[in-house]
Amino acid sequence: MTTGEQERVVVTGIGLVTPLGNDAGLVLRRIRAGASAAGPPTGFDAGAFACPVCAQVEVFDPKLYVSEPKMVRLMNRDAQLAVAAAHLALEDAGVKPGPTYAPDDIALFGATGLAGLPLREVTPLICVSAAPDGSFDLARFGQSGLKVVSPILSFKILSNMPFCFVSINESIQGPNAIYTPWEGEGAQAIEAGIRALQAGDARCALVGGCDVKTHELAFASLQQHGLFSSWSKTSKGVVPAEGAAFLVLEIEKDALDRNARRYGCLSAQRLRPQCDREDLFQTRLAGLRSLKIREVEVLVGAGNGDAGQEEQESAMLEAAEISVRTKLYPKKQVGDLFAAAGVLQVALGAALTFAGAKTVLANCFGHGNTQAAFVLKRA
Amino acid sequence: MKRRVVITGLGICTGVGCGATGFWEGLITGRSGIGTVTVFDTSALPVRIGGQVKDLHPKEFGSAFPEAAGERDRKISLGLNAAAEAIRDGGLEASALAPALLVVGVSLETFFLNDVSPLAHAANLAWALRGIIQGGAGPCLQTPLDQLASVLGGYYGFGGGRYTNCSACAAGAQAIGEAFRRIRDGTAELALAGATDSVLNPLAMGGFSLLQILSTENDTPTMACRPFDATRVGTVLGEGAAFLLMETAEQARQRGARVYAEVLGYGSSLDAYRVTDPEPAGKGAALSMAKALSDAGLRQDDIDCVNAHGTGTPKNDVAETQAIKQALGKRAFQIPVTANKSMTGHLIAASGAVEAVASALSLFCAVVPPTINLTNRDPECDLDYVPGNSRPFRGRTVLSNSFGFGGQNATLIFGKHE
């Protein structure tokens, strides 16, 4: 669906917490300068896995972004990152729930990744629940295991928690939904925000994604799901990352009325699942064709470092007859933020239109059920 | 002009019964689906009861859904069961779903603690994990939460979009609400929406028991969940799945489909209060109901029945009662308010979808199921909760509430189809 016939939706705020920085302009400058956030994980020995590196947020104090510091101890790392990025986005947009828009007029749509089991918190439970032969013993688990974990463990592993903390921290009460778990789900959150605004369900939408793939359980899962298959002694592949990205969206007229900065206009989007008998190339190509664009100034490409991805993306653009002047591949340098990646792609696209690009294509291709692309235009 | 959206297929699997007919018979006769959990040995846990689905045979799905063969996660099997039933019940061939929309609600991943027991005395967690996964041959440590959407997509197509909503206990209602809005607004023609969940595993049952929101009345499982009763001590976890086949009223009429009910409105809100407790005055929940009423273009007096979230926890039931009174005014005292969880237990993500099925069947069969185990009404819960026995129902609308851990609220309004 394109948004052309409906009220224009603009990006008025960007909030990022990424391994290459928390400011969209800075992240873009670092990407253009060839910087890379990839490095050996600080928390574990990546030598155990096919992928030797990840992209971490090095300097981060969640207490700087929360209204009640004690809230931080209830949060997993993904929630901490989400709360920070959401706060930065609202601050950037100059939106204060209450004074700017009623709390129930602000929608919240988000995407989270594979949980969240805080392995290091759960390890003591596993230890005391183990029988002498090392097997899991339900009797020990019941008698001793549950005594060594936090009572709020269940809340921490619920996938919606990062966004519930965002709503509490910012007093947001509007329409909401949380999607999971891959790159395309961030695009679903953006689409849901656009729909809520155009349907009149909300006057402002905070949309975002968060993910943490920089711990050993994530590495084990990604390897198990084949996502490290490109890595070898001679070739590189996806770099798991952590971070969060949020956008503030508004109907353009409302943004103009309050003299808000408009980063860019979300002029078209296409979200498409892989259909019967299609391969991934065809799915993505069909999505790009349906955007009905001929020329973009900048491509924010989805290539994540896996072998052949960039070439495939270029071939798709050629087949869709879309000419591109400049190509950026943020995931190669920031790392793959998975559930946050789609929103980060669009956030960087919005920063580029604000910096002068006339049209930007942000591809949110990835794993899972949804392949998405957004077109941004100068507001 | 907005299009009318109707429900033409139902699929459900809960401890009360599997299949719409069995479920409904159980519900209106007040049959509890709660008993001692037998999925694993619960004898050392403080909570040993749950709304377990009996006779679930995951391997039977292997031929129809080869991707799910060998799947250990019960929510996948439950979801496949309910989804396939809804499609069959709607009288559609599998190929008809190729362009349809799919929205699935889920809550949290299932972790099998026995898989990770080698971590117990490992000097190095990373290397121990590598040993567990055995380069891909070991047990799957994390089944992605979109697994059910992927399997259903692989079999039926669902080219109109595949969404996996993880809004905790509001996920099922949000999934149905999203599908409803998309059909009504013209961006989808046909949708399968619902949710699945199973938290009957050691980590989830043990973890939730630590929150002290679960009933520990293990010796009297069928009476353990007592929504709105003065003696209620907590909720009971359950498992199950429910899916609704939804389409435009016009399309249903053209193909001569049986219509269970119409979807009239949907609203969602956030408490923005605490992740561990509902907002005590019920303001967020009332807001969700108000948004659904507005979306449906209805007034307070147009609501004829409430299918409550009704968990049986001391805090929820008082807050929800307050919320219903705020949202519906004096009408709240004139209509039945029923709590299906008294029989099914709390199915977390799936609860909203299960209660949507119950709401649709209330309208279709003209019966309101009871709230069982309600014999000592809490003075702070002063509405008509349909205690004990089901009742004939001549109303035209049912409002269904789902409130999620963390403060996400969703409300659906269903209407009698005429």
Image (cartoon, coloured by chain):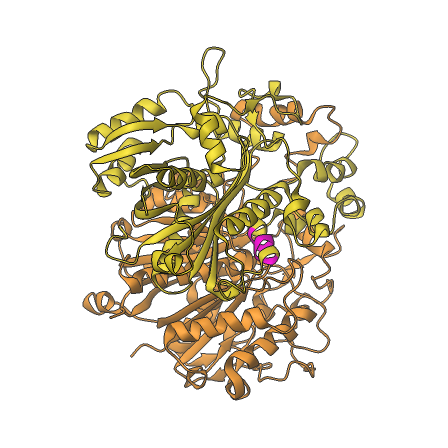
Q: Is residue B266 above or below residue A341?
A: below
Tell whether A228 sits left or right of A66. Answer: left
Which residue occupies 48% across, 42% down? Answer: A181
Which residue occupies 29% across, 79% down? Answer: B418
Q: Is residue B345 above or below residue B148?
A: below
Can you give x and y, in whole percent of width and height, for residue A325 in the image?
A: 27, 28
Q: Colour of chain A?
A: yellow
Can you give x and y, in whole percent of width and height, for residue A343 in the image?
A: 44, 42
Tell whether A296 sits left or right of A19. Answer: left
Which residue occupies 62% across, 29% down? Answer: A216
**Relative to the observer, which residue lies in front, B319 or A55?**
A55
Can you give x and y, in whole percent of width and height, for residue A60 in the image?
A: 64, 37
What quarter of the picture does the N terminus of chain B occupy? bottom left
Can you give x and y, in whole percent of width and height, for residue A229 in the image?
A: 46, 22
Q: Colour of chain B?
A: orange
- The answer to whether any part of residue B227 appears in the image is no
- A166 magenta-colored: yes
The stretch of residues the image draws in magenta is: A163-168
- B333 magenta-colored: no
Query: Which picture quadrant has residue B278?
Result: bottom right
